[in-house]
Structure formats: structure tokens, C-alpha cells
Image: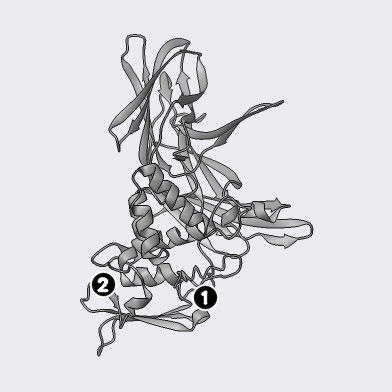
Amino acid sequence: MKKILALILIINGLCFSQVEYSGNKNSTGNPPMFYYDVAQVKSSSAGRTRLEVYVQVPYSSLSFIKKDAGFNASYNVTISLMDEKKENILNEKTWKEKLSSADFNQTLSNKNFSLSNKYWDLLPGSYVLKTILEDGDSRRTSSREMPLKIRAITDSIDISDVLLVSETIKDSTGEKIILNVSKTVTNKDHSLSFYYNVYSDKDRDVYIEYYLNDPQLSTSTKQLDPKKLKAGTNAINFTINKANFSIGSYVLKIMLKDMDWKEIKTIEKNFQAKIYGVPNSILDLDKAVEQMVYIASPSEKDFIEDAKSFEEKMNRFLAFWEKKKPNQKVEENPIMYEYYRRVEYANKTFKGFGEGWHSDMGMIYITFGPPSNVERHPLDSDAKPYEIWDYYEINRSFTFVDETGFGNYRLINPDFSRWPGYRQ
């Protein structure tokens, strides 16, 4: 089925009802993607720490509407601060952002984004931050939660949290820092820029040591930066050069030491490295190739897997997806992003006795996308639990039965000849 992946996408038009636990007739399309980051800095309020929250929304995540000579979009953000047990909302902020673009191709790019931020002055302690993004036109929503441990920042000498920087722009008004809110770098990057503050109650000399740790290779890049601090807030914008990134999780550690090399404060920043031009969810190239079983033919998949080196395998992988790109004028490939979004969703949702993408439900979801309608029968007295997924666009239905009672739904009478490579 060359692979219908029915990436039935027909990318510029089709909206899907969400199985995501669907039946929600007011929600069409994929949840809007967004990134967020937080930083704890010194507050002007005694005994409190300022929590800065940054929200970044790629244009490609939003619904742009043609209006007059351009295209307009909007989104709403709600950030809620809850207690550690999530029993009470302690504070909440809501705001709306409006965007416009004269070029439709620019609305499809992940490189164009909207960035906004808010802050709270908080007492040290444990909290939970919840962020909800709503697309202004489609009303699609996404949400994220993260636990927070707010620390006290001392008056004598201390250090703020670190924010990654994607670019520093100099103009007539001075320097402008563009934050890397996604906390992601690629294999094409050979440096890491970041920003933070050091607070001191007096002028003093210190050493600042930077460690860039690669847990995959158990290696560390180290740089030393002697500093003369002034009394007050010292803003530091630093770049580690000659860095090499592959795929996976990295840790930046900043250690503040006095002139006797005694450690004063240490702060860490976690971030991800990925392959340039692929979704952030792909952190293992071999696994990503294995997951292509529903869109690549066996020979295409074998060709990629038979590469002699990582670089060759990556180039073959990217070349395969380049052929699927519907719009050569846009750098991002929406077919690839949608495919691996479905893989990621399947892994999170269809948990049986193995990985979700390899389950029967995962196979159908990844191949055809969210069904138009889901009919659930979890408690029928005369039958085992089952679900029926209807796809109106292709006039097909799929029935899944939980034979074991443990949520391992299997497809009834699957036509394996239609799924090349499935469970080989």
C-alpha cells in the first residue's frame, strides 16, 4: 500500500477526530505543540524567589486564517500554580497572543514562533506548574505539567537558573537574546550558548567552571572562566565552543568557586540533542528506522538499516523522508512529523504487553491516524471488552478485542498481507 499511511493526512486539508481519546466532536486536528521553560532568579521581594515562565509556540502549530492581505492566528495560554499534591490552585495567569504573516509558507515553518513570558514571586517550597495552550481558531488544546522545587536565593552570593540561548542579535539598541525554550540542539550544532545571573553582595573575584556532560559517551567538556563580579546582579552570556552533539540527553553544569577553589554554588541544566530536521521525539535513530515499518517497504527499510556508519544511516533515513515532503519550499517535513507524532502517541496510549507502536491499535493508528469515531464496549456482560474504530474517509472499520482482560487489544481477523513488515 505504498503506504497509504493514509498519512491520509492530505496535509493541507484534513482534520481528524481525536481517538486521543476521541469521541470529542468539538476537537479536530492534532493538539497544538508548544515548548516551555522556567528559570528561578532573585526577587526584589524579601524571602521570595522569582519564577519566570517562558512559552514558545511554533507558527506551524497554529491555525492561520486568510484575512485581507495576510494570514492571522491567535492562541490563549493559562499557567496554573498548584500545591505539591495538586489539590489547590494557588495562582493562575491567562493571556492571549495574536500573530500575523504576509507569507503562507512562513505559517508552516517551525522556525517561526511566538514567545511570551510571565512570572511569580514565590516562597521557597514544592509546587506543580500546569501550562495549557489553546489555539484561537480551532480551539484545540495541549497541556503540560511539571513539578517545581523553588529554592531560596541568598543575598551574599548565589546563581540563578540557566536559560539556553539560540541566537544573540546586535543592533542599534544593543544585544537581544533569543532563548532556546525547547532546550534542544542538533547534531549540526558545535557550540552551546546560555544565559544566567550571578548575585553578589560585594565586588569579588571568582572562578566559574563549565562542564558539558554527555551521558551516552560518559565524556565531559570542561571550560574555566575567571570572573570579577560586581556588587549586585552580574548577567553572564557564555558560549561553550567546539562541542559535538549526537542524540540523547545532555547536562550542562555550572560551578561557582572562590579563589581558593572552594565550591560556592552549582547549578545544572538538562537539554536534548536530536538529528537536524527530525522531530524532537526521535532520540534513537535505530529505533526510528525500526518504527518505519508502516510506511517503508521492506527493501527501503533494509537499505537504511544496512548502512555501514551512523552518518550513512542518518543520510539514508533523511533521504527517504525527503521524498515524502509535500512542499519543497518549506524546510520542515509535515509527513515525517505527523508520522512520528502518531508513533509517540501510540507509545503513550496503547500499552499492552509491548511497545505501543508495535501493538495492533498502534499499527492502525499510525497507518490511518485518529479514527472518525470510536465505539467502546468495556463492560458488556456477554462479551469480552472490545472497541470499534470507524474511518469514514476510507469507509473502513476495525474491531479490537481484549482477550486477556489486561488491556492488550488485538485486531480481529487482520489481513496481514496488507501490512508489509508487520511483526516480522
Does residue 118 appear to the left or right of 386 in the view shown? right
Residue 148 location, quadrant: top left
- Checking the image for residue 408, the label placed there is 2
The residue tagged 1 is: 25
Q: How many marks?
A: 2
Label 1: few (<14), some or many (≥20) within 10 Å? Answer: few
Give how far across and how far down residue 368 sits, in percent: 45, 72
Q: Dividing the image into 4 quarters, which one contains the C terminus?
A: bottom left
- Checking the image for residue 33, the label placed there is none
Q: Nearer the viewer, mark 2 or mark 1?
A: 2
Give how far across and how far down residue 146 sits, in percent: 40, 48
Residue 115 location, quadrant: top right
- Identity, as a three-letter code, of the amino acid under mark 1: Lys
Earlier in the chain: of badge 2 and badge 1, it is: 1
Q: Residue at x 41, y 23 (%)?
A: 158
Give how far across and how far down residue 348 sits, in percent: 35, 61
- Identity, as a three-letter code, of the amino acid under mark 2: Asn
Label 2: few (<14), some or many (≥20) within 10 Å? Answer: some
